């Protein structure tokens, strides 16, 4: 591992922060924390922690000796000074004299002694940092270190690898007890330059930021070199099918299988992130991959990300893909059953009241293809994949020098169900569409963009499909929530298929379709050019059929139902003069929506239409408004507000109607009118 310390960068950061009133100690602490946090083989997504002992002034102007330690929720790779809250050292040091201290009381003690009471909670390992006498302390979960400590009898191996330079601390759950034990190990030999924590990671320390950082990189390199020099031959490879199925062909099956059933056709869905590389595939093609996965996580904090460990499934045979859905379902059911048993067995050991987390896997290993991370959001799914890559790195190293033997699941349980983590999860309420994927055609137009934004605000990840790639990307960016833009001509079935394939590649599937794209041409029906009418039908009817077919194809593979929503326009029931080229195919689309409701209701797929009128958009342009108002002999203002409410209807109003139908779990074959009130267009 490369040492990234740079004198010029360090000096610049000290100078930059000095202008903001931040002292040199804290500035250098930020600098080396970012160096550590930027290396995934050391820490991932909020893991690890660092500290420095310095001085700080409170609101009254009193100066205190403090420990600036990483705060909960901060990522080391992008940390700022406020991510290292200052805690009064005196109180922390007094705590070492206590015989016991609960997690809740430990947090209360730390918060009570913050210089700034608005700071985030200091790290659970704050006391360990405090009890060590060094000015700077670094802690990571290095995969190379884990290869050494994830052994059945790791202590002699630690001695072999590091000699007397590193102290050895047996596994103890992070908190007060670990802090005291680690401090005792250091006190027994103050010459050590760091501590190796069994099944956990590594601490290094020093009198300045560079010394602590240099020691971290040095001892990680010692571990890496040992693994490289003493590696055994790789394990035998599994036999793969002659022809492998594609990730796209199994992603919806897998995504549906890991959705959490809530009864009566309701599901908490997951987003899936597919990850592959030569290194990933080489490892998971091992004949022993199911055994490795079943042993657990490489370091306990990963349980918060991937539960008790990955799930391994067989390689998918392209010639037997029809049978693979049942294979996946069986493996997920076994994983969930084992997880429930794990929870029930360990929960029964005391009287603490706990709420079982959902039992679904968060990481699936597929020989021959790669791995899928699962999460309620794309961010969570990507984190699971990131963790999977580091799990592979650690397990590969552990198997190279011995046998991967991580923390037992019984010992893992108290950390996964740590009371403070339970409280954090309880306060994290999902949004109505969290875990769902919506694909919107005509997504860059006024209605499409408003719908994408509203659905994303309610937790969905949006796939914004539009003929214009740049506008699709812009609408997706404005929608937020990791939404994506996809360019496609939806009158071309191949491009429609490609758009849905893109949704599967990025998110794992599709749950909601908003079939919104359309265009209008004017002319009296009896005088219309045949080619123009056919062109209108291609966009205003057959394109709706094409996108609905693709959505249903994926929804059936997922097996968790879904929602089809069609923008049919008031022209479907109340045609306007010289607008037949638009109204006739829209009328067909209205009945298409009902046919889907009829044919797929038994599969939990709902189909509804929104009947909108006079919405300023790419379809109803200023020129069109002028033309239509002129045809009716009214002003443009009166034309746009010519309804029972006397108010103009907006794209946001239509988006609200689509959202209503997405959430109306017991409504199908319905048509919702969004036109401010038009009796002639009211359905009878």
Image (cartoon, grey):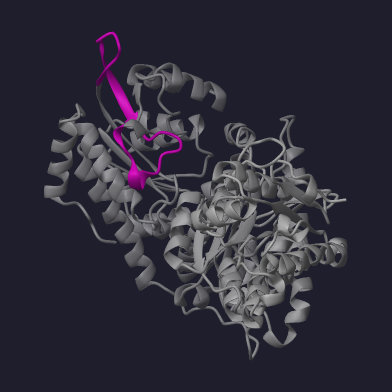
Q: Nearer the viewer, residue 618 or 320?
A: 618
Residue 367: percent from the left, percent from the top? 60, 76
> In this rendering, is residue 25 above or below 555?
above
Residue farthest to the top? Answer: 60
Q: Nearer the viewer, residue 216 or 547?
A: 547
Q: Is residue 569 left or right of residue 168?
A: right
The residue located at (71%, 30%) in the rendering is 352
> In this rendering, is residue 402 above or below 209?
below
The residue located at (45%, 74%) in the rendering is 279
Q: Is residue 211 left or right of residue 154?
A: left
Q: Quadrant of residue 70?
A: top left
Q: Nearer the viewer, residue 592 or 315?
A: 592
Q: Quadrant of residue 97?
A: top left
Kindly tell me whether residue 199 is visible in this rendering.
no
Q: Nearer the viewer, residue 261 or 386?
A: 261
* Residue 74 belongs to magenta span: yes
> In this rendering, is residue 413 above or below 441?
above
Residue 426: percent from the left, percent from the top? 64, 34
Kindly tell me whether residue 236 is visible in this rendering.
yes
Q: Is residue 25 left or right of residue 221?
A: left
The residue located at (28%, 50%) in the rendering is 35
Residue farthest to the front? Answer: 633
Report the label total: 0
Q: Quadrant of residue 248?
A: bottom right
Residue 19: percent from the left, percent from the top? 15, 31
The residue located at (50%, 37%) in the rendering is 174
Q: Which residues are magenta?
A: 56-81
Residue 424: percent from the left, percent from the top? 58, 34
> Which quarter of the figure is the N terminus placed in?
bottom left
* Residue 339 belongs to magenta span: no
């Amino acid at each position: 591992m490369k040492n990234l310390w740079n004198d010029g960068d360090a000096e610049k950061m000290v100078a930059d922060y000095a202008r903001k009133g931040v002292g040199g100690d804290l500035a250098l602490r930020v600098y080396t924390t970012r160096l550590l946090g930027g290396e995934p083989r050391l820490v991932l997504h909020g893991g690890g922690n660092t500290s420095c002992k310095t001085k700080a002034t409170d609101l009254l102007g009193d100066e205190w000796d403090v420990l600036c330690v990483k705060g909960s929720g901060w990522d080391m790779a992008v940390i700022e000074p406020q991510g290292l809250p200052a805690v009064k050292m005196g109180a922390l040091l007094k705590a070492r004299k206590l015989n016991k201290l609960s997690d809740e009381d430990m947090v209360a003690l730390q918060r009570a002694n913050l210089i700034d009471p608005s700071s985030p909670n200091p790290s659970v390992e704050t006391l360990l940092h405090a009890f060590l006498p060094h000015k700077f302390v670094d802690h990571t979960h290095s995969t190379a270190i884990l290869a050494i400590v994830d052994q059945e009898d790791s202590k002699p191996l630690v001695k072999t690898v590091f000699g007397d330079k590193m102290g050895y601390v047996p596994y103890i759950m992070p908190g007060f007890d670990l802090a005291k034990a680690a401090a005792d190990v250091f006190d027994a030999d103050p010459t050590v330059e760091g501590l190796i924590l069994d099944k956990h990671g590594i601490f290094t320390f020093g009198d300045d930021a560079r010394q602590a950082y240099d020691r971290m990189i040095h001892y990680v390199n010692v571990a890496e070199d040992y693994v490289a020099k003493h590696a055994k031959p790789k394990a035998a490879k599994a036999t793969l099918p002659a022809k492998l199925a594609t990730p796209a062909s199994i992603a919806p099956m897998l995504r549906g299988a890991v959705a959490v059933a809530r009864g009566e056709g309701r599901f908490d869905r997951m987003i899936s992130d597919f990850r592959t590389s030569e290194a990933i595939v080489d490892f998971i093609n091992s004949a022993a991959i199911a055994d490795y996965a079943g042993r657990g996580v490489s370091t306990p904090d990963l349980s918060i990300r991937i539960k008790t460990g990955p799930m391994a499934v067989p390689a998918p045979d392209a010639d037997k893909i029809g049978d693979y859905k049942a294979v996946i379902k069986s493996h997920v059911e076994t994983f969930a059953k084992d997880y429930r048993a794990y929870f029930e067995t360990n929960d029964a050991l005391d009287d603490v009241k706990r709420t079982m987390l959902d039992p679904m896997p968060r990481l699936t290993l597929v020989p021959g293809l790669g791995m899928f991370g699962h999460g309620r959001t794309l961010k969570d799914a990507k984190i699971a994949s990131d963790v999977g890559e580091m799990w592979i790195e650690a397990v590969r190293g552990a198997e190279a020098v011995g046998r991967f033997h991580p923390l037992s699941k019984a010992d893992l349980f108290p950390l996964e169900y740590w009371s403070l983590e339970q409280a954090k999860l309880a306060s994290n309420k999902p949004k109505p569409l969290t875990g769902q994927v919506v694909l919107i055609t005509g997504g860059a137009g006024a209605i499409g963009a408003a719908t994408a934004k509203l659905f994303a605000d309610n937790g969905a990840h949006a796939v914004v499909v539009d003929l214009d790639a740049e506008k699709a990307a812009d609408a997706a960016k404005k929608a937020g929530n990791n939404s994506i833009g996809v360019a496609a001509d939806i009158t071309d079935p191949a491009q429609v298929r490609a758009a849905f394939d893109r949704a599967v590649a990025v998110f794992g599937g599709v749950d909601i379709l908003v079939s919104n794209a359309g265009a209008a041409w004017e002319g009296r029906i009896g005088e219309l050019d045949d080619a123009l009418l056919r062109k209108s039908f291609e966009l205003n009817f057959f394109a709706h059929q094409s996108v609905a077919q693709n959505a249903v194809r994926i929804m059936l593979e997922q097996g968790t139902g879904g929602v089809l929503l069609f923008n049919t326009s008031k022209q479907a029931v109340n045609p306007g003069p010289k607008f037949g080229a638009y109204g006739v195919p829209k009328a067909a689309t209205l009945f298409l929506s009902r046919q889907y409701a009829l044919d797929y209701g038994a599969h939990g797929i709902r189909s509804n239409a929104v009947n909108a009128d006079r919405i300023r958009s790419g379809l109803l342009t200023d020129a069109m408004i002028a033309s239509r108002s002129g045809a009716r002999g009214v002003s443009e203002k009166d034309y746009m507000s010519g309804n029972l409410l006397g108010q103009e209807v907006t794209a946001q109003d239509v988006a609200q109607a689509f959202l209503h139908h997405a959430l109306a779990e017991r409504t199908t074959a319905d048509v919702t009118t969004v036109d401010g009130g038009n009796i002639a267009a009211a359905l009878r």
